[in-house]
Image: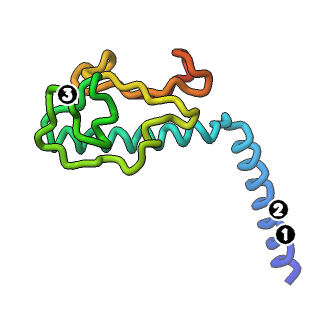
Amino acid sequence: MRFLKVLFYFIVTCAAICAGVYWLYLQSLPKVPKEVVASQAVHKTLAFALYLFELDNGRYPTTAQGLRALLEPPSSFPYADGWNGPYIKKKRELKDPWGRPYRYISPGLKNPELYDLSSLGPDGVVSADDIGN
């Protein structure tokens, strides 16, 4: 019976040590601001909406038409004859968590086959903290 008691305390002690080491590991991970996580999620939503637009129309919206073409049919050439939107639900999805519009370029400079979609991040200027494809 004494052996079981010692074994129990040994297991509990090992579990506590493992939990402490894991907690220290989690504390060492870099903190990602919630706005950055939100921006990445909206970015993926917009990327999917752009994909749906491309499926319906055979092309992505032009830079001039912008992301607004996901909410309403483009009123400038080239027209979207296959437009079957809206591809996003709310106009606020066109702004990043800091209230600035997402930057959209089609065809993209980084992705000439597709488009460039980015947010200027928390500082609002082109810098290393920008979020995009």
Secondary structure of residue under mark 1: helix
**Whole-percent x and y of residue 65?**
27, 28
**Pointer 3: residues within 10 angstroms few (<14), some, or many (20+)?**
few
- Asked whether disc 1 touches disc 3, contact meaning CB atoms under 8 Å apart, the reply is no
- Say which residue label 1 marks: 9
Camera-side residue: 28 or 96?
96
Residue type pointed to by label 2 = Thr
- Say which residue label 3 marks: 76
Residue type pointed to by label 1 = Tyr
- Position above or below: 97 against 64: below
In primary-sequence order, the first of circles 3 and 2 is: 2
- Asked whether disc 2 touches disc 1, contact meaning CB atoms under 8 Å apart, the reply is yes
Residue 104, located in which quarter of the rendered image? Answer: top left
What whole-number distance in Å separates the C-alpha atoms at marks 2 and 1? 6 Å
Residue furthest front as drawn: 75
- Disc ID at residue 13: 2
Q: How is the image coloured?
A: rainbow
50 relative to 42 in the view: left or right:
left
What whole-number distance in Å separates the C-alpha atoms at marks 1 and 3? 74 Å
**Pointer 1: residues within 10 angstroms few (<14), some, or many (20+)?**
few
- Position above or below: 101 against 82: above
- Disc ID at residue 1: none
Secondary structure of residue under mark 3: loop
What whole-number distance in Å separates the C-alpha atoms at marks 3 and 2? 69 Å
Instruction: Report the residue at 22% width, 34% height from top.
Output: 74
30 relative to 133 in the view: left or right:
right
Instruction: Report the residue at 25% width, 48% height from top.
Output: 85
Camera-side residue: 63 or 52?
63
Q: Please tell me whether mark 3 or mark 2 is closer to you in this view.
A: 3
